[in-house]
Image: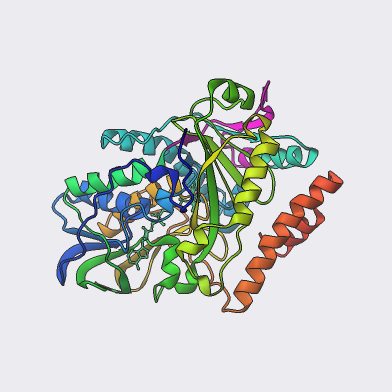
Amino acid sequence: MAPVVTDGSPLWLDGLDLPSREPLPGDTHVDVCVVGAGFTGLWTALGILEREPDARVQVVEQEFAGFGASGRNGGWCSALFPISGAELAARHGRDAAIAMRAALHDTVDEVGRASAALGIDCDYVKGGTHSLVRSATARSRAEEEIEDAEALGLPAPEWREDAALGTTLFDPQCARISPGRLVRGLAVAAEERGAAIAEHTTAVSVQPHEVLTDRGLVRADRVVVATEAWGARLPGVGRRILPLYSLMVATEPLSGAVWDEIGLRHGETVTDFRHLLVYGQRTADDRLAFGGRGARYHAGSTVRPDWDVSPRVFAHLERTIGELFPAAAGARITHRWGGPIGVPRDWHPSVVRLRGGVVWAGGYVGDGVAASNLAGRTVADLVTGRSTPLTALPWVDHRPPRWEPEPLRVLGVNAVVAATGLADAEERLTGSPSRLAAAMARLGLR
Ligand SMILES: Cc1cc2nc3c(=O)[nH]c(=O)nc-3n(C[C@H](O)[C@H](O)[C@H](O)COP(=O)(O)OP(=O)(O)OC[C@H]3O[C@@H](n4cnc5c(N)ncnc54)[C@H](O)[C@@H]3O)c2cc1C
């Protein structure tokens, strides 16, 4: 019987060899210093070394490579972007919106290609995503999604009828991965190409040409900040990003008969159209890994191991598994964990050149698995002085407004989280699109 793990540790790091790397030995001088060893920081380091094989690249990581969201996520490598195509076009123009969407679309394949080329087995299978359509309100949101893609002339998701899943909107452009294997593999690959990775080393301030850590000063010609949600603690990043928790559970491995009843094949991921997002994948070892939002925001943008665990949210996820997939209702839950996603005030991810040549990348909300690869390649082009189609994408130098100071921030964000859950309850009761959700959308809240 699979053991039950209750300490908040992600399924994805189970059984992986996690040798600890040494902290920074002291003051050092390099060409590029990258803060954060998640997908963004590691794809960036690899991208720089591909362009400048002799560059001296120092990565500093407060815990260990893959400690952050990159080692904890739902493993959807998708072309999703947290704001719609229509919003992108309204902000940057139609051509720029198409270019951004097309680049994300291609990146889903690029992650598969690049990880294979680096010799990383991360269980990448491009099985696509099913969005379950089990109500009239879900149908109308599915239609909106198709219209949003068609308006930009991009490939739209397609209707499917499945004996087990029912009606779904199917998007083929999504791969299922095991994120822990990818992020740990990227760290090894970056070291093999010459990067130095210092773990247990916390950056306490980032200035042009220098990163002060608790283990010494790194002087660098170029500095990259890839700290996502944890960046809220860094002076200079602070209110650019808000840490909002997403939590996950995983069942024990399920039998083929149970999977036949559920209806998900190998490599497929699943969601539905509720406002308070849920997401799942059939893992390589036949578990259902299932996550969702709804955890409250913690005042002062605090990020703590305690927040990775919420009995209320875990219970909600386990109930939802039973509602969506009755065949999995009794399955034992072996893992429960969570982590913060990084949310910019306007939900628009970006790659930004800050003062003095410091580059910051992130703000992916919950859609960073593929986007961080695109960001890493884009940052590598920028810091090596290249002007490419990637550096012309509209998320480059997009500057979201800052989040409100406290206590406005905690009051506002938690009111929106609560209202999002209520909007789903309203739709279940009335069977019509939520008036609360419509009111929030008019106010620019989500
Ligand atoms: C539960 C969950 C589910 C998700 N599901 C999906 C999904 O299915 N698909 C998807 O596309 N996205 C998903 N996401 C989002 C995705 O995981 C992230 O967008 C992506 O991993 C971000 O990568 P990153 O490298 O920018 O950040 P991270 O992986 O968070 O890496 C940042 C690193 O910086 C380090 N760091 C921070 N501050 C400092 C400092 N001061 N000094 C040194 N080091 C520092 C951290 O320790 C961390 O390792 C999910 C996220 C969560 C939490």
- Where residue 263 appears, x then y in whole percent? 61, 25
Residue 108 or residue 355, whichever sits in front: 108
Is residue 359 depicted above or below 320 in this figure?
below
Q: Quadrant of residue 379?
A: bottom left
Q: Identify the residue at image location x=67%, y=24%.
A: 164
* Ligand 1: image quarter: bottom left
The magenta-colored residue range is 148-177
Is residue 201 depicted above or below 156 in this figure?
below
- Where residue 75 appears, x then y in whole percent? 46, 41
Q: Quadrant of residue 324?
A: top right
Name the image colouring: rainbow
Q: Identify the residue at image location x=52%, y=75%.
A: 300
Left or right, residue 91 beside residue 107: right
- Where residue 339 appears, x then y in whole percent? 48, 56
Is residue 225 visible to the viewer in this orientation of the structure?
A: yes
Residue 214 or residue 441, whichever sits in front: 214
Q: Identify the residue at image location x=16%, y=71%.
A: 26
32 falls in the magenta region: no
174 falls in the magenta region: yes
Residue 320 or residue 134, whichever sits in front: 320
Left or right, residue 246 beside residue 294: left
